[in-house]
């Protein structure tokens, strides 16, 4: 077995993939392999999204994942002051047979801590005796340092184990909890500080979701549309600057409510005078936005802001074939089956393609099936979708390839953020390629918007959210005295709106380099 195979087999033992639908909890399918970085969540200060993910894992069919998630959650609740709830979770999930070395020591330290705080002397004594008999290897020392730094217990580098017997101190000595050094300055040397600038966060506009346009037929739930881009208007007249309130007619809002949500959000944040009208019963509108097609019309000119995913998937497949990929697993999202078929047909003389819908429930079963069909040959991958959709597949790509060290991975991802490049997924994206409409880390404004949006909505910003933001910027650029900054790679030319997708090689550690193709 190759070193690469051993490497990915090892990673599968450490990682559990989190496949969560925001705002809901659902059990995983029986027998499904889940990948999630136990150490990452054991060390991290958990946020609301992390807690949801761990809660979902506690009811999965993968007992190992459930036990590890339960132990981490139990520790979280204890640290949050919910001692009774946390202590019960810790006791219910304490099972060494499902823990690696690092998590095993952590689990017993956490139960010991909760038992002491609960004044449960018997359990505390049992846990102390167990820990005293454990060898102090590097994994155990790391667990002790983590626990003692969190509890603000002094750590003696000559006897790290002894930290659990000490009382809390004000200044913990730990790489996990470094405190800033504050220099005392005499009043004579003090320099008056400027008054802080306080920015009031604008409230969301007091509007309910606008009524939909009445139609003859009741719309059925729609999948992601296969977008046909409108033909560019040959004559592009100079934009007429608007004054006062701008009124925009929004059509097909039900096809992409995320765009509408992002527009309302951006209007509120920027405090701009733009009204979105969903009825369509006025005699005149400054602009018409088609949320389904992601286009905006001004006068006789239509501007296309839609995702370049079709072009990006084609470009990614072209790169993979040119790099020598012979058997390519081509994954697509809802609405892009025809795109995938066209790509397979275009390159059928140069490579064999295996197509599958990445939104299938049993996508792991399909990957196993492809591995069996490969006949021992390396599988390469081209997966097109949103960041969250591709991340679901990313950890399994080389794992299911008969020769992972020979696999070529070129994914087409709508927008790429830190989550794709670093953290628990960074090891899997390293040494792969990506074609994308936008790399968030390259644009400070985009990264800031994504961060604020994620905090306000408790979900990551998607391509639709960036498009909604940029629609408002398009309008703002045409207001008297207005200004706007696009987040996507958009340029306005005499021929309309253009956005150039770019290809990158991911080097690891959040670093990537541009690839000319």
Image: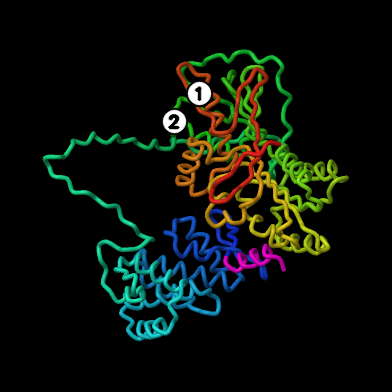
State the image coordinates of residue 25 (x, y, percent, origin top left).
56, 61
- The part of the image, by quadrant, that contains residue 17 is bottom right
Does the rendering let one see residue 280? no
Does the rendering let one see residue 121? yes
The label shown at residue 270 is: 2
Q: How would you rate the neighbour count of disc 1 (Cα within 10 Å): few for under 14, some for 14-19, many for 20 or more?
A: many
The label shown at residue 397 is: none
In the picture provided, is 136 more to the left or to the right than 218? Answer: left
Q: Residue furthest front?
A: 158
Work out whether 131 lies above or below 275. below
Mark 1, residue position: 476
In the picture provided, is 271 more to the left or to the right than 302? Answer: left
Q: Residue furthest right?
A: 349
Q: CA distance from mark 1 to mark 2?
A: 10 Å
Work out whether 14 lies above or below 465. below
Nearest the camera: 452 or 302? 452
Quadrant in the picture for the C terminus: top right
Extent of the magenta region: 1-14
Tags 1 and 2 in contact by the CB under 8 Å rule? yes
């Amino acid at each position: 077995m190759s070193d690469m195979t051993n490497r990915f087999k090892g990673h599968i033992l450490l990682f559990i993939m989190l496949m969560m639908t925001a705002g809901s909890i659902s059990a995983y399918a029986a027998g499904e392999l889940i990948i999630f970085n136990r150490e990452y969540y054991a060390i991290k200060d958990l946020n609301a999204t992390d807690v949801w993910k761990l809660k979902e894992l506690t009811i999965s069919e993968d007992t190992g994942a459930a036990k590890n998630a339960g132990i981490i959650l139990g520790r979280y609740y204890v640290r949050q002051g919910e001692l009774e709830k946390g202590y019960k979770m810790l006791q219910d999930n304490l099972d060494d047979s499902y823990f690696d070395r690092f998590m095993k020591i952590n689990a017993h330290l956490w139960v010991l801590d909760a038992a002491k705080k609960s004044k449960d002397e018997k359990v505390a004594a049992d846990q102390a005796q167990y820990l005293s008999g454990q060898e102090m290897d590097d994994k155990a020392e790391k667990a002790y340092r983590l626990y003692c730094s969190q509890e603000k217990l002094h750590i003696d580098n000559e006897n790290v184990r002894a930290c659990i017997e000490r009382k809390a101190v004000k200044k913990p000595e730990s790489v996990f909890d470094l405190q800033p050094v504050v220099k005392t300055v005499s009043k004579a040397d003090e320099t008056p500080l400027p008054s802080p600038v306080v920015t009031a966060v604008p409230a969301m506009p007091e509007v309910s979701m606008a009524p939909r346009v009445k139609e003859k037929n009741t719309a059925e739930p729609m999948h992601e549309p296969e977008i046909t881009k409108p033909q560019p208007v040959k004559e592009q007249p100079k934009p007429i600057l608007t004054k006062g309130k701008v009124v925009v007619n929004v059509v097909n809002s039900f096809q992409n409510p995320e765009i509408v949500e992002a527009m309302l959000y951006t209007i509120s944040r920027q405090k701009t005078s733009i009204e979105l009208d969903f009825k369509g019963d006025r005699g005149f509108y400054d602009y018409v936005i088609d949320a389904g097609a992601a286009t905006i019309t001004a006068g006789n000119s239509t501007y296309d802001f839609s995702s370049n995913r079709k072009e990006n998937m084609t470009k990614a497949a072209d790169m993979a074939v040119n790099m020598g990929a012979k058997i390519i697993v081509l994954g697509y999202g809802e609405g892009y089956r025809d795109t995938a078929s066209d790509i397979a047909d275009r390159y059928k003389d140069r490579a064999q393609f295996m197509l599958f819908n990445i939104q299938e429930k049993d996508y792991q079963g399909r990957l196993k099936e492809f591995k069996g069909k490969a006949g021992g040959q390396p599988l390469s991958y081209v997966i097109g979708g949103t960041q969250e959709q591709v991340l679901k597949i990313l950890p399994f790509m080389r794992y299911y390839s008969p020769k992972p060290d020979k696999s070529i991975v070129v994914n087409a991802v709508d927008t790429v953020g830190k989550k794709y490049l670093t953290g628990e997924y960074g090891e899997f994206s390293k040494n792969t390629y990506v074609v994308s409409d936008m790399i968030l880390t390259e644009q400070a404004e985009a990264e800031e918007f994504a961060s604020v949006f994620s905090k306000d909505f408790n979900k990551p910003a998607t391509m639709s959210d960036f498009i909604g933001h940029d629609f408002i910027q398009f309008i703002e650029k045409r207001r008297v005295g207005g200004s706007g900054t696009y987040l996507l790679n958009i340029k306005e030319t005499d021929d309309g709106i253009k956005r150039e997708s770019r290809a990158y090689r991911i080097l690891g550690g959040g670093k990537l380099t541009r690839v000319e193709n």
